[in-house]
Image (cartoon, rainbow, N blue to C red):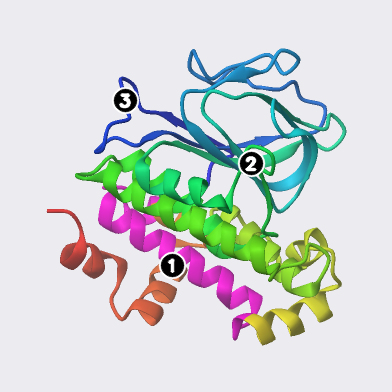
């Protein structure tokens, strides 16, 4: 996925059929100013002065660390694997540490279903931070939201609203049960899965993934196979094939371009791997399942 994706839905009435206001992902390198200049009016803010939004936002930090400060909650130290909730009408500010930067997903929303969760006490202005760890399912939900927002197909707002309801329920459940610890091996394997999803279009070795996940390669490969039931290189290849399916069925990009975009050694190798996994060549698959 590209290192920045920002989508604002203009003239959003936030009514029953239009609950999603924005979706995004940004990677902020260390030593960078924040916020970036990529945001719409009403969303860009001065980190020293803060801002007030009209809607809720979920912000999920998947790398780096920083600070959140809110009117009712005070100051929170935000680390990798935390989600924080921004409430409508409440002053807040947040920013990554200058030395570390951070990567973060977010989605802005309103709607009675999610507000019901808030009112039942699963989240409050005083306790807006959730410790979920680097959770592959949560990352997948944010990435799915980005894909749906980018495509804007029929009923996309309803799909996004459903994703948010599930996302809020999942993060509350994980935080409440503390199923994931930031320092354990399970969390490191989840982080490796997240890295692979984010680097799916690049040529990256599993040794690099192991190092980024904080493990030696031998231990990483052993634990990965135990948890994911396949070798890391196979998991990464599966992600590439999944991305190829998406490109074949939703775009007109040529098979050759798809092969190079996903960093396969050659179009012939890509076609062979695709047919082995999917039972059809990329051309055959597009002819049968592509948009007409």
C-alpha gap between disc 2 and disc 3: 23 Å
Q: Which residue is drawn at 24% across and 38% down?
A: 17
In the image, farthest residue toward the left: 292
Q: Name the residue under label 1.
A: 241
Q: Residue at x 71, y 70 (%)?
A: 189
Residue 34 vs 187, above or below: the answer is above
In the image, farthest residue toward the front: 120
Closest to the observer: 34 or 225?
34
Instruction: Residue 214: give x, y in percent of width and height.
Output: 84, 64
Q: Can residue 49 be seen in the rendering of this structure? A: yes
State yes or no: discs 2 and 1 in contact (Cβ < 8 Å). no
Q: Give the SS element for disc 3.
A: loop
* Magenta stretch, residue numbers: 228-257
Instruction: Residue 216: give x, y in percent of width and height.
Output: 86, 72
Residue 48 within the magenta-colored segment of the rendering: no
Q: Name the residue under label 2.
A: 104
């Amino acid at each position: 996925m590209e290192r920045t994706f920002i989508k604002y839905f203009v003239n959003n009435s936030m009514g029953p059929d239009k609950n999603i206001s924005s979706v995004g992902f940004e990677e902020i390198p260390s030593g960078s100013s924040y916020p970036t200049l990529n945001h719409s009016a009403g969303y860009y803010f001065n980190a020293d002065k803060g801002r007030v939004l009209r809607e809720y936002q979920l912000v999920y930090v998947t790398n780096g660390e920083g600070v959140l400060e809110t009117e009712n909650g005070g100051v929170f130290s935000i680390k990798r694997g935390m989600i924080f909730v921004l409430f409508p009408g409440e002053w807040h500010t947040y920013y990554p540490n200058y030395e570390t930067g951070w990567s973060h997903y977010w989605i802005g929303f309103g709607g009675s279903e999610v507000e019901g969760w808030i009112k039942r006490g699963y989240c409050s202005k005083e306790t807006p931070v959730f410790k979920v760890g680097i959770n592959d399912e949560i990352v997948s939900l944010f990435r799915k939201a980005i894909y749906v927002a980018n495509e804007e197909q029929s009923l996309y707002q309803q799909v996004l609203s459903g994703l948010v309801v599930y996302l809020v329920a999942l993060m509350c459940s994980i935080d409440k049960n503390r199923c994931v610890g930031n320092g354990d091996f399970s969390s490191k394997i989840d982080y490796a899965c997240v890295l692979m999803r984010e680097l799916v279009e690049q040529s990256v070795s599993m040794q690099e993934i192991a190092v980024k996940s904080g493990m030696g390669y031998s231990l990483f490969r052993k634990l990965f196979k135990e948890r994911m039931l396949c070798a890391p290189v196979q998991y990464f290849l599966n992600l590439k094939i999944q991305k190829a399916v998406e490109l074949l069925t939703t775009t007109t990009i040529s098979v050759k371009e798809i092969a190079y975009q996903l960093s396969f050694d050659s179009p012939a190798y890509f076609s062979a791997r695709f047919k082995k996994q999917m039972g059809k060549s990329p051309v055959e698959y597009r002819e049968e399942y592509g948009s007409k």
